[in-house]
Image (cartoon, coloured by chain):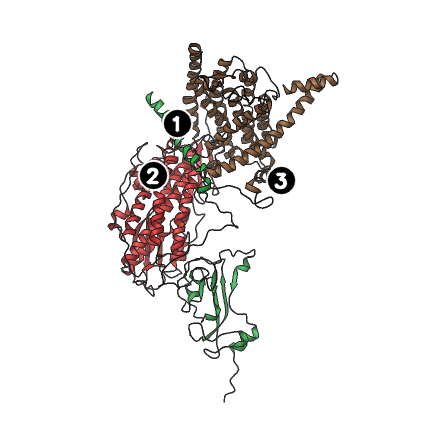
Amino acid sequence: MGVVQGDQMVLNIGPQHPSTHGVLRLQVRTDGEIVSEIKPYIGYLHRCFEKHSENVTYEQVIPFTDRCDYVASMNNNFGYVVTMEELMEIKVPDRVEYIRVIMAELNRIASHLLALGTYGLDVGAFTPFLYMFRDRERILDIFELTCGARLLYNYMWVGGVSHDLPKDFERICIGFLDYFEPKIKEYNDLLTHNKIFLERTADVGVLPPDVAINFGVSGPNLRGSGVNWDVRKDEPYSIYDRFEFEIPLGEGEFGTVGDSFDRYWVRVCEMKESIKIIRQAIKDLPDGDVFQTIPKKIRPPKGSIYRRTESPRGDLGYYIISDGSPIPYRVKMRSPAFTALSSLGEIAEGWMLSDVIAILGSLDIVLGEIDR
Amino acid sequence: MKKYFANIWGTITTLKTGMGITWRHMMNIKKDNVTLQYPEERWPRPERDIGFEHEKYNVIRSRLHVDIDDCIGCLKCERACPVDCIKIDTIKAPTRGEDIPDIRHTGVTENGTNKALVVSRFTIDMSECCYCNLCVYPCPEECIYMVGGPNSPKHPIDYEFSEFNRKDLIYEFSKPLTSEQKSELMNPKPDAKA
Amino acid sequence: MTVDTLMNWFAKLGDFPELAFILAVLICAVPVFLFIAVYALVAIYGELKISSFMQDKVGPMGQGVGLHAGKWGLLQPVADALKLILKEDIIPTSADKKLFILAPFIVFIGAFIAFAALPFNQNIIIADMNIGIFYILAVSSLGVIGLIMAGWSSNNKWSLYGAMRSAAQIVSYEIPAALSIIAVIMLTGTLSMQGIIQHQSGFVWGILPNWIIFQNPFTFLAFFIFFISGVAECNRTPFDIPEAESELVAGAFTEYSGMRYAFFFLSEYANMFIVSGIAVTAFLGGWQSPISGILNSPAWGLWWFMSKAMFLIFAMIWFRWTFPRLRVDQLMNVCWKGFTPIAMVNIFGVGIWHLMLG
């Protein structure tokens, strides 16, 4: 008498699916409901960003960087501009630095709101998604007031910014922050401390710290596993060393350290820290001319440089090689969501199919950044 | 055993708080409503108060417009576009700064510059435009801009310019020239000046 | 009871008992079907509007007939129904055709025949059997077969997932539901629906109506267990893993389109009404008014029954738009390790309380 052998089912969580964040194909081998192997297939959104940037001038690359991580495009611009200014050794005035930090942190809040909202949608809570998007709309209205565009800004230029802040920016921005802080408490009541949500996310998809470091994961995913690494504090760029803020770490209060709840919780706390930074920056905003250090013609010296900045998804790095002409020789973008997606295969094996969707949501990937 | 009942009690209280929040939102719908019945109601465009210094800089990303009478044909906007959606053809004018009434060409721009070139083709393909605003800044005569914003006295805001046919989105701004007028401009008859 | 009155009326016309029976049943079935259809339209409109209000938006709104969706969006469910009827009927080539076509009918029948024992009124009840509640609990599990057929015959791995999860869920949650109904039956001593309602007339604790939910703290608990198990039987959030939208697009019903999908939809709303109907009958006093003695003519009786059932359906809609969903094994845990032991202990509690303080 033999033992009854079951067979494994190969399932495609296909490119079109309501909850892969973009066009991603996951080939999953399951035994009943338990998943034994996951293989991600990417490339459905590849738009040849790096090849395009070898044919256009340095300032024309900036709209293309916007479109890689379309959810947090101020941070993409910031990374590119900081790298270029280090290559060309330009020192921008203080007002420009403060404006850039305010915009980047506002976009961090907007990106985290989107991440948390869609994560709630993945586990089945329909209402917090709409509340978070309504608040995100207010941030996009602030951006529209400043630079005219709602999602893809082309705002930060090499040597400055494209528009100065309007006169009543301070009133509008502080008004938004005062409106938004009590909302975080409302989201915690509705979703974060909900017992059903805790059951779905605590202890699920644990990412141990050594595995995370081996894969190169960074950002809130790494901090959720307890590792204290934030580019804004450890390799400060721009004027981040003048602000006081803390780095939230995952502590495993409802489960083990490094589970999905910890990653979620780190993002909620990071929103609060960003609010602190924006308040400090608006209080100290100096006057000045934002257009004075914009070079008329961008011709960097020959050489190459790699610089990383902190985007809402992790370590965003730009590697630029220039050969002295106005057109770059090579621009490479190191995307943090790529490494997060590659760790999915390791942490999601052995869980059930609904958990795979939940873990994918907690890693917060944006396919535009992975495929470029 | 105690954990079992504590679990149940925790479930009941957190579920009750969650239900309270949705109940409150439902009761306050008249105050909290964020939906607008488009097209009867629209969000107002944000009015920017930038002070008097940079009022010529436009901020709204809407439809591109060119005041063709001010264009001197320098091709700076064509070079600045990252996606190559602006196409300009120019012909050397027979005399610099003089009007040519047959083709409605004005010789002097609003700012007083004398034009040396006649613009025979100025097309912008709005379906390819990525709304990056990079073409607005290099123009020395400030004749290409996105409508609305500080330029609204000249051209009111327009962000609803969708068409049924893709070819209708290729905007032609130059004054139309027939092929005889074009060849006459390119090979001018020698002046009877001897 | 309605079938009986009709048969008596036919007996006056002549002596054809079998034909009279068939005619009476057919004549009673048509209003039930119309009621389900109209009620489904009202419930869909209610769900749209209530969910929108909870999410800070207003849902479908209109300016009048023909523009958008009628005043306040009242024509929206009509538009939905028309769309479903007029859609193209697609059957995948590799699907098992006979089972594919048969599945929606079986699911609908399971929901439809349970309406025969719901007491809308003192006089309006299609068949007042003396085993009313037992009959409803028995036939409402017929829908499981239809779901499994739908999932298997679609020849789609996602549908198969949804169908298997759904079958496990519905079959498991029958047990706490039945156990809490047993607590009620212990108190009333009869299985007939009208009998249970008659038992709940009068007052208890002075001013509270003598509904079973107030007679006993353990029956209070039994009501909640029954209601939540009923929500699980209807595949509604937080137990909607079989049709989890963000994972399985529509679970077992992914391949269905047009009128066949409409049947599944109708049977989900009909199931909701049945569960509310049983909860109202067994725990909340049925068609009796809260202040016993006044406002209890037959017309008022119909009004009380419908409003209590609608309130419970509102609670189901409220649950759906507030909570995330449970995972399959957590669902099963909650049922077998949570609800079933508590329901069993509950039966003891009801009995002991009634003995000592009845």
Secondary element at image label 1? helix
Whether labels 3 and 1 belong to a single chain: the reply is: no
Specify the amino acid type for callout 1.
Ile
Residue A266 falls in image quadrant = top left
The residue under label 3 is: C86
The residue under label 2 is: A263
Q: Colour of chain C?
A: brown
Specify the amino acid type for callout 3.
Leu
Percent position of residue B33, x then y: 46, 43
Q: Residue at x 34, y 55 (%)?
A: A80
Q: Quadrant of the C terminus of chain C?
A: top left
In the figure, B70 relative to C65: above or below? Answer: below
In the figure, C273 relative to B39: above or below? Answer: above
Q: Give the spatial CA distance, label 3 vs label 1.
A: 45 Å
Q: Quadrant of the N terminus of chain C?
A: top right
Q: Are marks 3 and 2 in contact (CB under 8 Å)?
A: no
Badge 1 crowding class, 10 Å Cα cut-off, few under 14, some 14 to 19, many 20 or more, is few
Whether labels 1 and 2 belong to a single chain: the reply is: no
Towards the viewer: C179 or B186? C179
Q: Which chain is red?
A: A
Towards the viewer: A80 or B45? B45
Q: Give the spatial CA distance, label 3 vs label 2.
A: 47 Å
**Is residue B95 visible in this depiction of the protein?**
yes
Which of pointers 1 and 2 indicates the residue nearer the eye?
Answer: 1
Percent position of residue C137, x then y: 54, 20
Numbered tag placed on residue B12 in the rendering: 1
**Is residue A304 visible in this depiction of the protein?**
no
Q: Chain for mark 2?
A: A
Specify the amino acid type for callout 2.
Arg
Q: Which chain is green?
A: B
Q: Give the spatial CA distance, label 1 vs label 2.
A: 25 Å
